[in-house]
Amino acid sequence: MKIKEVTVRHMQMTLKSPFTTSFGTFRTKNFLLLEVKDESGVTGWGESVAFDAPWYNEETMKTNWHMLEDFLIPAILDKEINHPDEVSAIFAPIRKNNMAKSSIEGAVWDIYAQLTNQPLAKALGGTKDKIEVGISIGIQNSIEELVELVDGYIKEGYKRMKIKIKPGWDVDVIRTLRETFPDTPFMADANSAYTLDAVDVFKQLDEFDLMMIEQPLASDDIIDHAKLQKEIKTPICLDESIHSVEDARKAVELGSTKIINIKIGRVGGLTEAKKIHDYCLANNVPVWCGGMLEAGIGRAHNIALTTLSGFTLPGDTAGSSRYWEKDIIVPEVVVKDGYIDVPQTAGIGYEVDMEAVEAFTAAKKKFN
Ligand code: OSB
Ligand code: MG
């Protein structure tokens, strides 16, 4: 294939309810959506998971636009591409900016799956026809409100509850949840809110049979995580610290992580995500697919990736209605009894709702 045209859109979609992590609150999501056309007119879609502020990592929607316009799109236009794996090689001279790279790489995978007439999940080597999903629950105003939310999500069928924690919203919260819901699989995500000084907090959390604790320490650390893991029983799962299969190998070898949260954008695309999956499968490290409050395109890519056999733990890919009044794909992603059915048509397997896309477009630019 040869990429002939890329349309970049600045999208603006308001979340149904605010989502609060230890680093801030999301209300409206600003992100980039990419429509990529090849020489035969086939269209692939990609979504950047960079937020509008550099809280989660250093990228933003605007740095992504800059990288796409000035480096990534020029690097890929008119190049002969036989397989999407070649995209990461084309982008290799450009350091980091993984979410920007991933947005275009995902669209190339979508085109490749359509050209080879298979679902994206199959093109990636996935084997499942439904995936098991959990839900990530932000910091609330009170424990009572959190208990009520959890109760609702259990009734909706979600397979595990991920609870965001931060200093002052941790041990008491998790204790109450464990007492109220003795059999529910829970995990906690700190988004780097602690240092090793807080080792006692994690020793206390050890009592509540959490599946794992996600990214307790600094986003650029794998040394202190290894020290913390030696002190506690609950498995540590790294999110922010892992940007590549090499990062994954080093963290696993050091004992910094026993489980890995794979986010396609954070690691620079589906090809690298697959490499991390393969490494972890070979080394008995369970993985699951993280989320970045995606709209439908990003969600579809996450679903396809999760069909790989090493994704043995429920991910964060909840249904569209958990985030949006109206998503940009048809049908929307639906969770039934804790599972999402994997679409069986070629490409990402969902139709793009162009009317919705236009309605949420704040700006767009075509490159060819
Ligand atoms: O750390 O996994 C995270 C949302 C925004 C930024 C970081 C994270 C999250 C989530 C939500 O946990 C996952 C989702 O529902 O998409
Ligand atoms: Mg996380």
Image (tube, helix red, strand yellow):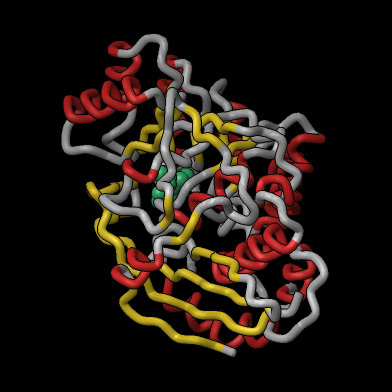
Q: Nearer the viewer, residue 308 or 283?
A: 308
Residue beneath the point at 71% across and 75% down: 91
Residue 62 visible (yes or no): yes
Report the residue at 63% width, 57% height from top: 267
Taking the image as shown, residue 10 lies to the left or right of residue 225, namely left
Provide residue 239's location: percent of width, then percent of height. Answer: 55, 46
Q: Number of numbered discs present?
A: 0
> Which of the 4 image quarters holds residue 278?
top right
x then y, percent, for residue 176: 27, 18
Asked if residue 92 lies left or right of residue 52, the reply is right
Q: Is residue 211 above or below residue 217?
A: above
Residue sitting at 27 percent across and 40 percent down?
Answer: 139
Q: x%, y% of residue 15? A: 27, 53
For the C terminus, the quadrant is bottom right
Query: Quadrant where the N terminus lies?
Result: bottom right
Point out residue 229 in the picture as x, y percentages from the top left corner: 59, 31
Image side of residue 242 versus residue 144, left or right: right
- Identified at 46% across, 23% down, the residue is 203
Residue 194 visible in the shown view: no
- Quick check: 172 above or below 108? above
Pick the front one: 180 or 41: 41
3 relative to 343, above or below: below
